[in-house]
Structures are given as structure tokens and as C-alpha cells.
Amino acid sequence: MLFPQALLTSLAGLLLLFCGGEAFVSGASQMARRLGIPAVVIGLTVVSLGTSAPELAVALMGIERQDTALVLGNVLGSNLFNLLVVLGSCALVVPLRVSRRLVRRDLPVLLIATLAVWGMAAAGRLLWPAGLALLVGLTINLVWELVSAIEQRQLERRSDSDSDPKPGGGLVPALGLQGLGIGLLVLGSDLLLRGALSAARLLEVDQAVIGLTLVAAGTSLPELVTSLVAAYRGRTDLAIGNAVGSSLFNLLLILGMGVLFSGSSGIAVPAVLLQRDLPVLVVVTLICMPLLWSYATITATDGALLLLIYGFYLVELVVLAKLPTAIGTFRLAMLVGTGPVLAFLGWSVVSWWRVRGSGDASPPAL
């Protein structure tokens, strides 16, 4: 592929991505209005499931090629991208209001799921009982989402007789829009990734850098574009719900199915994922909890902070791949250079626990 062709392919993919994101968000918003349930619930379920399609495709491809480590690596990389890049980028577009249920329910569930995967992976291999446990957890979570949505809808109807679902188009057109949107998102991400990979190779970009940046982010493009479009349209509940819900689906559905389909041998857990990426994901999830609780809004400053953390993570991956002997020096320099950031995060954690203890300030209920 020549460079002009690679550039045109990337631009076509980018155009399809944004068209798909627009259609998907419109369909999800219509569904929320038609069913009379909070948009954040749609974001945590329907939208998240749709945007997780590329991760599912990669997982099945990895199992078919006997590269089971790809399944776990892609899930962890996608979750880090969702929590740091997707939330951070959306916060730069518009401040993201955080719903109370997201902080009190969904983020703790995500943290528990992440810790559970870390604990099960500690043995060095994920076997079929672990996959079954993850899928059971997914089922329980989906039933819980459905029951809580129905209860909230009934409460709203009791408190206000005019709170019936507002006309937002039929359910079938909304589902059709979402189906069209996810199709365009998958096709667009594939075209953009192919064009970017070809352009990077023509420019003689190092293979390690390509693998750790373009390929790692490729499967998360639907989540990023969908959340950016939702944030731009003012549907910040959809934007945050998509990022958190997609991370949950990755851990419970994608990884759970991957482990079950891998057979009796299961999925071997590389030491580097167990010692670095899983702990990093746990820490990032812990960072998001006080960040969301303390302010009830993710500001542009918070978004820049999340993107900075992801930047440090990528730099470490590149340094580890190209200069393994310099990794200790880099980590020391990063620790010294990010001292103020770590102090800020520590203060956020303390503030969060104080707010929880006093019960005076809470995120707004959306």
C-alpha cells in the first residue's frame, strides 16, 4: 500500500467511525427515551456490548491461532485505554457529570471484577472454572442492571404522573440505528488501523512502537469515538457509562468466553501481565473512584491527568521493549517527575474517604 493510499484509507476509516458513533449514540438515546430508563444504564449495557465487538473478535482470533495470551493482553490494554484515554479525552471536550449510581455501584463492581481476575490469574493460568465464574458474574450484573432500571422507572412514575417515556421514535428504528452504528464503527476502526499501520511502516516507524500504540488502541476506537460523540452531544452519562460498561464487558464477557473456548488448557498468564499490567489496571480503577466521587464532575484538568498517566504507561512499554537495561532509571525519573501528581492523587483519596465518612457531599443523581 502506497502512502497516499494509506492516508486515504485512514481518513475513510475516521469518517466511518464518526458516522457510526453518531448513529450509535442517536439510537441509544432514542432507546433510553422510548423505554423511559436512564441513559447511563443504556451506556453500561447496550452501548458497551456493541462497542466491545472488536475485543470479542480479537479474543476469538487469538484462540483460533492458539495465541491465548493475546486474549488477556487485549482485555487489559483495552480497559486501560477506556479508563484513561476515553474518559480523559471526553473530559477535554466537555466536563463529564458523574451519576451517583456509577460511583456507588458500577465502579466498585468493576474494581471487584478486576481484583477477581488478578486473583485468579495469580496461579499462572486461567482455567474453565474461572471463565464460568466470570460469565456468572456477568449474568448477575446484567440482571441487577435490569432490576434497578425497572425500579427506578417505577419510582419516577409514582412521583410524577407525567414521567412516562417521551416520544423518541420506535424501538425497532432505535435498534436499527445502533446496529448500523456498530457496523460502521467496526468497519471504520478496521480501515483506520490498516491505513495507520501501512503509513507507519512506510515511514519506517519501529515495530515495537507500532504494536504498543496503534494495535493496542485499535480495538478501543469504537469506545473512544462513541464516547466522544456522546460527550459532544451533551450525553455525558452515555459517555462515562460506555467507558465503564465496556471495561466490565471486557473482563466478564470477553475474557470469560475466551477462557471457556480455550479448552482444558486454559489461558496461560504471562509474568509481565501479572506483575505489571494487572496491578496497573487495579491502581487506575482505584484512582478513578476518588476522582469521580470527590468532584461529581470530571474536568479538563482531570482528563489531562488521566491522559498523562496513559502516556507514562506507553513510554514505559517502549522503554522496556527497546532499552530493558534502562527501565530502572526511567522508573526512578518518572517517580521523581510525577511527585506532585502522586501527591494530588493521595489528597484525592483522603478527600474521597472523608466525603464517604461524613455523607455530606454526593455526586448528583442522573
Image (tube, rainbow, N blue to C red):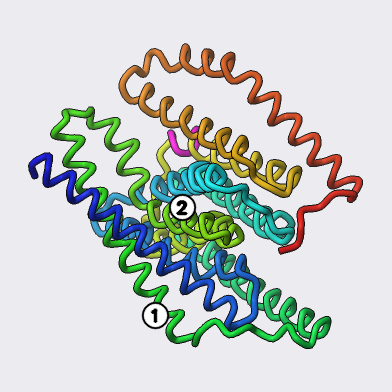
Label 1 sits on what residue type? Gly
Q: Is residue 243 above or below residue 24?
A: above
Position of 146 with respect to 58 (left or right) is right
In the rendered image of this protein, does residue 79 appear above or below residue 39?
above
254 relative position to 361: left or right:
left
Query: Which disc, if any, is residue 126?
Result: 2
Q: Position of residue 21 (x, y in %)?
A: 41, 62
Which amino acid does the dot numbered 2 rest on?
A: Leu
Residue 19's disc is none
Residue 283: quadrant of the picture: top right
Residue 130 appears in view? no
Q: Is residue 41 magenta?
A: no
Start and end of the magenta stretch? 272-276
Q: Residue at x 37, y 61 (%)?
A: 56
Residue at 39% x, 80% y is: 176
Residue receiving disc 1:
176
Residue 140 at what x, y percent from top left? 62, 71
Tell me, yes or no, if residue 357 can be seen here.
yes
Inter-mark Cα distance, 2 to 1: 37 Å
Quarter of the figure with residue 172: bottom left
Nearer to the camera, 233 or 96 = 233
Vertical comparison of 244 with 217: above or below: below
Q: Give 163 or 78, whichever is nearer the viewer.
A: 163
| Circle 2 crowding by C-alpha within 10 Å: few under 14, some 14–19, many from 20 | many
